Image (cartoon, rainbow, N blue to C red):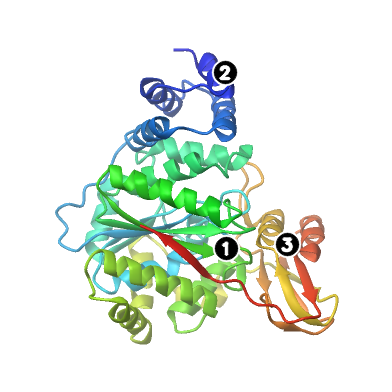
Amino acid sequence: MSIIELIERKRDGGRLTPDEIRWIITEYTADRIPDYQMASLLMAVFKEGLDGTELAAWTDAMLHSGDTLDFSDLEAPKVDKHSTGGVGDKVSIPLGPMVAACGVAVPMMSGRGLGHTGGTLDKLETIPGFRTALDPPEFKAILEQTGLVLAGQSETLVPADRRIYALRDATGTVPSIPLIASSIMSKKLAEGLDALVLDVKSGRGAFMKDFDGARALAQTMVDIGRTYGTTVTAIITDMSQPLGREVGNANEMAESVEALKGGGPKDLLDVTFRLGEEMLLMVGAVADDAEARHRLEETITSGSAFEKLVEVAVAQGGDPAVLENTALLARAPEASVVPAPASGYLSRADALAIGVAATRLGAGREHKEDDIDPGVGITVMAKVGDPIERGEPLARVAWTDRGRLDRALTLLESAFAVSEEPVEPPKLIQGEVR
């Protein structure tokens, strides 16, 4: 087969056969198709899409590009959660320990930052020594030991997605329904789950900017799960403004720990509890929403969820001292504020602009090979609907490089708007797809 001919056909709106798609994924994974040609194909897919047959073949080829996991001998039910990506979205870090503390196995496979959105793995790796790349035997051993794994793809687990994920991040091909759906579902299907809950983001800071797009993406992934016999539910949540107050890596880890210790902002907790309720219900661990909520809240008040995070961190090589005292996490040495331009009510806290600003600070990658600065970030001091006084800080910026700060501030200053009239906060939970 000729990769050039296949790129041209997809570029011109043609279809790729399942055999051609399997060949593409196999050859790229084996380094026989270079990044620049795969990037061209991804752009063609971004522009022209994949039909149902192509999407099924693409997902299956990525799923079988390496090892899969077999947890069939584990007695506990197995459930995972995945987010389509947002700004300040650190839900996985408190959610996994809460659900695992309820006696459910959570083999949580996460990703790195993508575009303007943060990545769970980057946040976890602010814990010194924490290893997110586990080979399948170690992944399974830790799951058996603790009931929870917080990891990414090893070199052998769905390697095609790991490589394509990084390439999409650097080539402007992230917000594509088939590419997002196949990326998420290939990883999740490799886990051999009993059930999967998806947090599909909708709004300015999401890859799906409106509810209809988010619903279409949710339906696509639910349908893929059904094809493989895996029960999938998608909860559509708002991403017009950042979730929680922290945007970055170490600062989001600190906010996650705060949530597990009984604090944390209400919007973060509301989404975390809603997803946790669904996870427990889907595997039959509880009878109804009320019981699910009670058990999840109990993991916070008893301290068992925080203890579970510490247990997993130790099992994966991390230093628990930074969880016991989050002041030990990386901190940028400098700070600046963005003041309110007028008094009134906050009417906009643009998640996209804030996410891009955080990337410009060094919290995300502008190039595939970039290192992340774990200590930089943005604290959102006000949320939409809050009363505001002129000069009051709307955001606090932790930074290390003056040039990066200047680039970030040009966006941050336009991210916020103040209205003279009261403003209704956006609805956080927008819908669901089953």
Q: Residue at x 56, y 31 (%)?
A: 48
Q: Viewer-proximal residue, 315 or 396?
A: 396
Q: Residues within 10 Å of mark 2 (few under 14, many from 20)?
A: some
Specify few, some or many for label 1: CA neighbours under 10 Å numbering under 14, 14-19, or 20 or more. many
Q: Could you give the CA–CA distance between mark 2 and mark 3, rounded to whole angstroms?
A: 44 Å
The answer to whether 378 appears left or right of 97 in the picture is: right
**Mark 3 / mark 1, whichever is N-terminal:** 1
Mark sitting earlier along the chain (1/2): 2
Tell me if residue 275 comes above or below residue 140 in the rendering: below
Q: Please tell me which residue is depicted at 38% across the width and 46% down the height of the picture.
A: 185
Secondary element type, mark 1: loop
Find residue 345 and report its horizontal and vertical position in percent.
75, 80
The residue singled out by tag 1 in the image is: 249
User: Which residue type does callout 2 highlight?
Assistant: Glu
Q: Residue 300's mark? A: none
Position of 121 relative to 96 (above/below): above
| 186 vs 53, nearest the viewer | 53
Which residue is under mark 3? 400
Q: Nearer the viewer's eye, disc 1 or disc 2? A: 2
* Residue 43 placement: quadrant: top right
Q: Relative to residue 24, is residue 418 drawn left or right? A: right
Q: Quadrant of the N terminus?
A: top left
Residues tagged 1 and 2 counted as in contact (Cβ below 8 A): no
Q: To which residue does mark 2 refer?
A: 8
Residue type at tag 3: Thr
Tag 3 or tag 2, which sits nearer the N-term? Answer: 2
Q: What is the secondary structure assignment of the residue under circle 2?
A: helix
Identify the image quadrant of residue 290: bottom left
Q: Is residue 135 visible?
A: no
Marks 3 & 1, CB-CB < 8 Å contact:
no
Residue type at tag 1: Asn
